[in-house]
Amino acid sequence: MDDQTRLEIEAAAFRRLRKHLMEDRKDVQNIDMMNLTGFCRNCLSRWYQEAANERGIDMDKAQGREAYYGMPYEDWKNGHQSAASPEQQATFEVAFKENVTDKD
């Protein structure tokens, strides 16, 4: 497989993941994703922002989130996120320490 084809396939897979998380599974809470997988929609938006910054594109956290969510983050949060339970928050504290590294 040539590099361009690989890049196109990787981009298509990312778009499909984004669609799945943003359209098909709006019900899944970010905190549950973090607790189970070590990443969530906010991580994906941050990785998007970092990739843009690495290529000389000036993009801040809010712009990265809006690019990923397709709307201001507060709009997504108000429409789809619920308050985290004390149990979810406690699990998150452990998961966050286990999953966040300098390379992320």
Image (cartoon, rainbow, N blue to C red):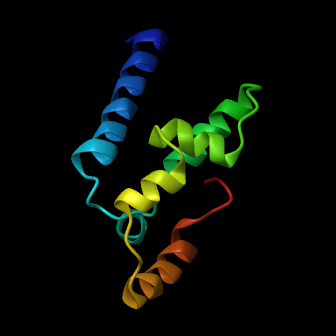
What residue lies at 46% left-to-right and 43% top-to-bottom? 69
Vertical relation: 2 (above or below) 46: above
Quadrant containing the C terminus is: bottom right
Image quadrant assignment for residue 28: bottom left
- x and y percentages locating residue 101 in the rendered image: 62, 63
| 74 horizontally vs 34: left or right | right
What residue lies at 38% left-to-right and 85% top-to-bottom? 85
Quadrant containing the N terminus is: top left
Q: In the depicted view, which residue is nearer to us: 96 or 4?
A: 96
- x and y percentages locating residue 31 in the rendered image: 42, 69
What residue lies at 32% left-to-right and 47% top-to-bottom? 21
| 99 horizontally vs 25: left or right | right
What residue lies at 58% left-to-right and 65% top-to-bottom? 100
Q: Count up the numbered dots.
A: 0
Query: In the displayed image of the protein, which residue is found farthest to the left?
Result: 24
- x and y percentages locating residue 34 in the rendered image: 43, 66
